[in-house]
Image (cartoon, rainbow, N blue to C red):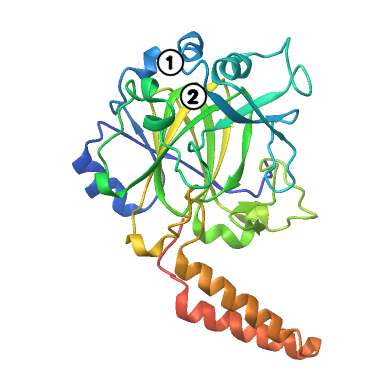
Amino acid sequence: MTETTKHLDLDIYTGVSKDSFLTEIYPKRRPAVLRGVDIGPCRDKWTVEYLATQGITTQVKVHVSTMPQMDFINKNFLYRSMPFSDFVRRAAEESHMEYFIDEKEVYYLRALGNDPRKDIADIHQQFPDLAKDIVFPDFFEPNCFFSSVFRIASRGLQLWTHYDVMDNLLIQVSGTKRVVLFSPQEADKLYLEGDKSSVLDIDHPDLSRYPLFNQAVRIEGRLQPGDILFIPGLWFHNVISEEFGVAVNVFWKNLPPELYDHKDTYGNKDLLPAQRAMQIVDGALKALEKLPAQYRDFYARRLVLRIQSKTYNKEMGT
């Protein structure tokens, strides 16, 4: 990590009830670890062998890579399908007798809906027997539920930095994770391509390519088995599995439903007004291309100033 990088510790709360979450934690719109919340018997039951006996014939599509730092932008991984039971055993191994690329390859499952084009991921639908073992905290209204995403990762696997538009709870069932988060206000330092940061190595960034990255304030902490991480919508997060780990993300629509793209089964498309705004900006940029460089620069700066004066919330901060 570069010396100029500023980091804050992730807030940890214990004894969290629905009332305390909604009145003390949720309004702050900051990520937080919720420790000691009942998540059901999954914490003790979901061993490798137990998981491998569930959904034996279920085929899952997994990420396979020789690089622990997975890069969604440049795709340094393959997608492969395999029986869930085989996947679990392989993901828990340090070295493999059977493999696709290399005996040291790592695996990552982000469970999908039965038909990813139409169905959301829901552990109750894709893994009903396992779903009986886990309890979701009742921190949001049932009619706001969007998805529950089953995740399993090999030790050492690091997911790319990205944001989600919905609020969510990351329930860490087994294994430990290091999590690094950035406020939405740090977006201009993260070198975004869509909802993902181009900076793959967040601890040792190439500052010749990403000179502003070490100015981004990060919030960092570790998740223990049984912990729940509250991630507000738009907060960037990078997750490193320090051990073989199992987790479930629960997403819910925290804004009026008409703002969301109803065709979005993954829950990662920008809100409809934001999509329209981006299209308008693209049109504005295309119009400015018709001007000489000096004029294009001048009017681009005016556009930025107008956006800042009309939309930036100066009261928000990390």
Query: Going 45% across and 10% down the picture, which residue do you hit?
Result: 50
Badge 1: residue crowd in 10 Å (few <14, some 14–19, many ≥20): some
Q: Secondary structure at mark 1?
A: loop
Residue at 76%, 88% in the rendered image: 290
Q: How many marks?
A: 2
Instruction: Residue 236 in the image: state x and y as whole percent.
Output: 53, 50
Which residue, given by chain and number where applicable, does mark 2 sit on? 246
Q: Are marks 1 and 2 in contact (CB under 8 Å)?
A: yes
Task: Characterize the local packing of mark 2: few (<14), some (14-19) or many (20 or more) Cα atoms within 10 angstroms.
Answer: many
Between residues 185 and 42, which one lies in front from this camera angle? 42
Residue 286: percent from left, percent from top = 70, 81
Which of the 4 quarters of the picture holds residue 225?
Answer: top left
For mark 2, give the secondary structure: strand
Kind of residue at disc 2: Val
Residue placed under numbered mark 1 in the picture: 46
* Amino acid identity at mark 1: Trp
